[in-house]
Structures are given as C-alpha cells and as structure tokens.
Image (spheres, coloured by chain):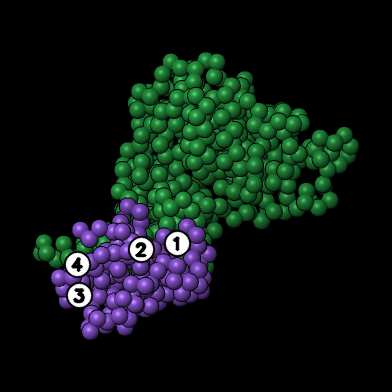
Amino acid sequence: MPVYSEKVMEHFMNPRNVGEIEDADGIGEEGNPVCGDLMTFYIKVEDNRLSDIKFKTFGCGAAIAVSSIVSEMAMGKTLEEARKITPALVAKELEGLPKNKYHCSNLGAQALNKAIDDHLKKQGVKVKTKRGRKDE
Amino acid sequence: MRKVYLDNAATTPMLPEVLEAMLPYLKDSYGNPQSLHGWGDEAREAIEDARGKVAALIGAQPEEIIFTSSGTESNNFAVKGLAGAQQSKGRHIVVSAIEHFSVLHSARTLEKQGFELTLVPVDRYGLVNPEDVARCIRKDTVLVSIMHANSEVGTIQPIREIARLAKEVGAIFHTDAVATAGTIPVDVSELGVDALSLAGNQFYGPKGVGALWLKKGVRIIPYLEGGVQEGGRRAGTENVPAIVGLGKASELVGKETGPRIEHLSALRDRLIEGLPSRIDRVILTGHPTQRLPGNASFCIEFIEGESMLMLLNHQGVAAASGSACTSKALKASHVLLAMGFAHEIAHGSLLFSPGVWNTGEDIDHVLEVLPPIVDRLRQMSPLYAKFSKEQSGRR
C-alpha cells in the first residue's frame, strides 16, 4: 500500500460529504481522467457562507481523502475564507501526503475554488483569481 | 479475517522444500565456489547441480545457463549484451510495445547509443502479429526481443513463429520468459530462440536470482566484469543459496506441470466468469484463450485501481493494478495503452494472479468482497455519475 498517514486512511475509508447537490449554487471540476484524477465539487451558499458542500471523485486514495478533507475544512466558511485553503494547508491537515501524491491536494483546493468562481459568476460578479487562471 | 494472496505475478511465495535446500548454504556451507578447497568444492558443486536443474526445466544444456540477480538483469544483459556483440553486422533492433521495462528501457538506452529501434505493435488482446514482426525486420536487424507472455494481461505470444521470422534475416532472437518459465512448459528448442530470461521468484523460488539461457555459440558482451564467474560473462561471487533455491524450484515445478496448470486455470476462469456476472462494465484484458493459467486481469470502468487495491487490502485480498496512481511515475500501464485502451479505462486496471496454494474459496471471497467495493467507489465517481445520467437519458 502507498505510505499514507492515518488521517488520509481514515478519510479514504470514511469520506465525508460524498454526493451531488441537485440545485447547487456552484459547481467546480478539476483534473481529468487522463491523468487519473477527476474531482467535482458542488456548493450551496447562504449569506456568503458555504452552507453545504458535496463532492464526487475519481482517483486514488489520496484524491478521495483530499476531497473529503477539503469539504470538511471549507464547510461553514465564508467564500473568502474558503479560498484561503491552499494545497499546503490540505496536506498539513491530512498529516502529510506522499511526494508523488501532492498534486492531489492541489486538485482539491482548485476544484473548490472553481465551484466558488462558478457561484460568483452566476451572481454576475467578475471573478479574478490570484492563481492567474483565466475566467473563461 | 481471511487472507487471500492473489499477486503471484509480483512474486510467488517460496516452496518450503526450496527454503530447506537453501538453508545449509546460508549456514555451514558458506564457501566461495571459486575457492580451491573443500568449502569451495561444496559450494561449486551446489551451483553446478542447480545449473543442471534450471537447464532441465527449459530443455537446455547446463553450460548454457548464466545465473543473474533477477529477470530484470537477465533482460538488461540480453538486450544490451546481444545487440552490442552484433553491432558490426547492423544496428537495428526490434522489440514489442508491451515488453517489461527491463527490455524496453534497455532498448531505449541502445537507441541513445546510436541503434535504431522499432517497436512492434500489439492488438486489442495484447497479441503480437508475426506478420508485423516480419514487416519490422530489416537486413541490418541484429536483435529481436519479444516476451513469451505478458504478466500484466497474461497474453502468450506465438514465439516459435516469430522466432523463425527473425532467424530468416539472421537476427538473434531473445525472449523474456519470466512470466512463463516454471509456469507453463518452456522448451528452448521448441520455441526456436537464441536467448531466454527467467526469474526464481516467479515460480516459487527465492527473490534476487534469475538466469539467462544463451544458446551455445551465441556471442554476448559480458554484463559484469571482474572474475571468471559464469564464464567471465557475469562476474561477482555467486549468490550460492539463491542459486541453489532457483535450482530446487526448477526441479519441483518441472514435475506435475499438468495438474498445476489445471488448478490455476480453474481459479482464473472462476474469476473471469464470476466477476462480469456480478459487476457490470468489466472488461477482461488480454487474450481470452491464449493466456497464462494464473492470470485474471480486468479493467473496471469508472473507478481507479489504487482505491480498489486499498479497499481489497482492507478485506485481506492482495491484487495488483496498472493504474497511473499505483505507479510511482504516475503513468498508466504502457501495456494497456499499447493495447488501445483509453487512459480512463486503463486507470481501472485490476489484476488477480492466483498461485498453487489458492483455493476456490479464495476466489469466492474475492467475488463476494469486490462488488461492494466497486459499488462504493462508483457512487463516489463523477465518471459513473455521468454514465448513469446518460443511460437514464437514453431510456
């Protein structure tokens, strides 16, 4: 087995917030099936806070654990706070990730960010991202 | 919890008789085979006895066996050493697209040194078409290396036919028989090859030992230079206990080949028939009939191999996968890609390789625990969600 921390294993075995939200306020997809990881995040927003988060993930143990912990870390946070969840914070919260799985932590944070972007766009807000990603 | 080891393609466990045979050479019989005294004689006799047993397993002469550290070493040795020894005749080599990396990467190294390399494609079943090999072979082709069987998908190649074509242009033919030697009957004259690799840990022998069979008269560049061991072609003090173990394993698996193949084939077929009837969208990979007795390989759609392995391990089951996430390099199996599978399908690769100690109950355990694992991962998978939506839209 890959050398995963207990926390990764725990989230992999019991992932939180798996699923879809039918009437999501924002949806974000990151990764692609070619590289082997694909994450979709669904969010509900109330008073600028993430009132519900669900995800679906195709990928390895790390990808599933990352999705789960990101959903947990972001739940109830304001959009601004949720955007501050960096890959490094995700990895730290999971008590570390193997080096070659680090990119998974990136995908989780990005998928959530894309869902927030999607929500804001629906609200008519022009989205600027620090990461230099073009908003369409 | 029931423990079910179904990863014999990675390594087989060792037969107890093999361990027994090895023990004296790890204890009191510690001599160096090259030494000129009683201790040396004892060790030398032991490795010569093993040489005879390994030769007998593949219908070869004892003096044609060179002991190595592994199948990987045998393949490196063969590809680099045979091509190197022939380069005055030509600098073109041919290998299949699904070779083990020890052949493929060695061929790439030769390419960097100025050799030309042609990769023979395979079909959807991982089968090399001899006519394709014939098309790849040229007047300056000095080496053709095609594996006897692929351990990932189990497909067995028509080596005899391919080797004949290689011979027609005077090229040397090497086959990586790591997955077949000691598993199915392998006879070097019947196959008509010039060189063949095998490894001990694939047929109930120890790890860290293999052999390269080299037909008498075929030239090769020494792999390790130093002393006179292995005819000066592979120097270094012999790994006596491991070589003795390899010999003992060769002797044991050479007997009762028929019943062993029958047993493994029955376990394999129980999986091949059982899984698709319990899980939808399962693809059998490899050839349906020309395949290794102990190989049941699949791609399970919409989910990823590493997750499956982790959950299977949780249920006491050891299997393998060629998914990108399971490889350190994060690349999907080159074998499955060469067979034409899309990346997302290849990521769902799952290989069960039963061994002699597995039982029908072991297989039934897998048939029981795998469907809920697949279901659980599919419920999490966005690819499966998309597929389900498309399906219900069609209805």
Q: Which mark is residue A24?
A: 3
Q: Residues within 10 Å of mark 3 (few under 14, many from 20)?
A: some
**Chain letter behind tag 4:** A
Q: Which chain is purple?
A: A
**Chain letter behind tag 1:** A
In the picture provided, is B200 more to the left or to the right than B237?
A: left
Q: Hey, what amino acid is under mark 3?
A: Ala
Query: What SS does tag 1 mark?
Result: helix
Q: Earlier in the sequence, mark 3 or mark 1?
A: 3
Task: Kindly indicate the quadrant of the structure image that contains residue A11.
Answer: bottom left
In the picture of the structure, the residue carrying the numbered disc 1 is: A102
Q: CA distance from mark 2 to mark 1?
A: 9 Å
**Residue found at x 50% / y 29%:** B112
In the picture of the structure, the residue carrying the numbered disc 2 is: A107
**Which residue is at the front of the view, B222 or A35?**
A35
Q: Which mark is residue A126?
A: 4
